[in-house]
Amino acid sequence: MKIAVLAGDGIGPEIIAQAVRVLDVLKKDGLDIEIEHGLIGGCAVDVSGEPYPDATHQLAAQADAILLGAVGGPKYDVLPRALRPERGLLAIRKALGLFANLRPAILYSELSEASSLKAEVVAGLDILIVRELTGDIYFGDPRGIETRDGQRVGFNTMIYNESEIQRIAHVAFQAAQKRNHKLTSVDKMNVLECTQLWRNVVEEVSKEYPDVTLSHMLVDNAAMQLVRDPKQFDVIVTGNMFGDILSDEASMLTGSIGMLPSASLDSNNKGLYEPIHGSAPDIAGQNIANPLATILSIAMMMRYTFNLEQAAQRIENAVRKVLAQGLRTRDIVSQGTHILGTREMGDAVLSNL
Ligand code: NAD
Ligand code: IPM
Ligand code: MN
């Protein structure tokens, strides 16, 4: 099990350090894990001048799975766009063909007080957002900022071809088959042609999955429904940008953005695993970030790339026990619970593994 670890920037190294301790335990207990570290994002720019250096690409391409912290930070906001840390993340996703981004939003019952919604609205929440990750307005051409007729214009292109839509639709239908057989496809077909095609193609693919009930929802309504009645959803499938936004929104239903892991898979289940949150520059270096999303990303790695369901559940159960013990980082704290730092939360997970 070759695992490339790319800690990145901001809180990246702090949360990754705790997740690597979990990998070390799995290794000690017999899994054949080999870890190699590499640079991505701002820290890679600092060393090599590029956010996704070739050495990192080689490392990632040869690995079975990649564990990533987060990239970006104010220090790098002045860089030309091609050198931004975020470009490194987009580059690795594209270069490795990681088109299927799975973002489960599960409310651990112990955290119902931490959710911004009323406990009865979110109790038992378990939804899966399937976000297309290598297309859409993120990668479309033309793009840029130009001067036209004496004033600046900024432009991007929202674009999907039908095969990109088909393959993510298959992933979503198959995920729904393993869950509650309900799929909601989110688009903006009332305004955008690109997403009219999205709706048509998802409809066509649905013929192959008669056991899944497909519905469609416009993205503005979906944003509202997610906070009105999130439990109406089972699996949501949507494009790159809508999925980015809706998954941050969904994270808050589960108590904190610091709780949501993700898997970004290619067609052979090679995967990159990362928390959905960013580098959180506002809290970096203070040992207060929540490492649980990153630790839960390792559970997803065990499940999706290595097919080790037991190892995945071992990690998830350890997290559940820590929460049941009333241990919290400050982003998920509520009355009667005890605040730990990042490292101490790692200790707590380890002692429950
Ligand atoms: P962010 O997700 O980094 O932070 C948003 C808020 O959530 C902040 O208040 C932060 O303190 C909090 N937060 C995030 N993760 C947390 C954790 N584990 N524990 C506790 N609190 C946490 O989003 P942002 O502030 O919009 O972006 C900061 C930088 O991160 C930007 O440069 C952005 O481009 C980058 N970014 C990177 C990724 C990634 O690497 N996958 C994802 C999102 C944003
Ligand atoms: C995420 C992030 C990235 C995205 C950025 C940093 C490129 O927000 O992983 O959700 O928009 O995909
Ligand atoms: Mn995001």
Image (spheres, rainbow, N blue to C red):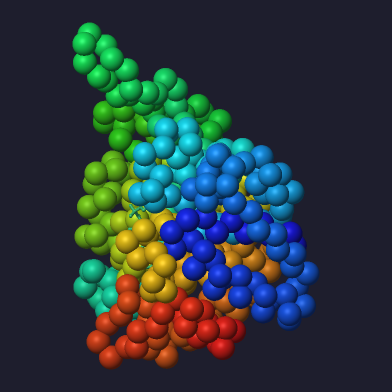
- Pinpoint residue 314: horizontal percent, then vertical percent: 60, 79
Looking at the rendering, in which quadrant would you find the N terminus?
bottom right
- Give the answer, above or below, for where 202 lies relative to 319: above
Q: Is residue 325 left or right of residue 8?
A: left
165 or 295: nearer the viewer: 295
- Residue displayed at 28% across by 15% down: 147
Q: Is residue 162 left or right of residue 282?
A: right
65 or 4: nearer the viewer: 4
- Residue displayed at 44% across by 22% down: 141
210 or 163: nearer the viewer: 163
Q: Residue furthest front?
A: 47
- Residue displayed at 39% across by 71% down: 286
- Pinpoint residue 170: horizontal percent, then vertical percent: 55, 44
Q: Is residue 239 visible?
A: no
Q: Is residue 334 visible?
A: yes
Q: Is residue 55 left or right of residue 223?
A: right
- Pinpoint residue 39: horizontal percent, then vertical percent: 59, 51
- Give the answer, above or below, for where 161 lies relative to 267: above
Looking at the rendering, in which quadrant would you find the C terminus?
bottom right
How many numbered discs, if any?
0
- Residue displayed at 43% across by 50% down: 72
Q: Quadrant of residue 143?
A: top left
- Give the answer, above or below, for where 30 lies relative to 256: below
Q: Quadrant of residue 331?
A: bottom left
- Pinpoint residue 19: horizontal percent, then vertical percent: 56, 70
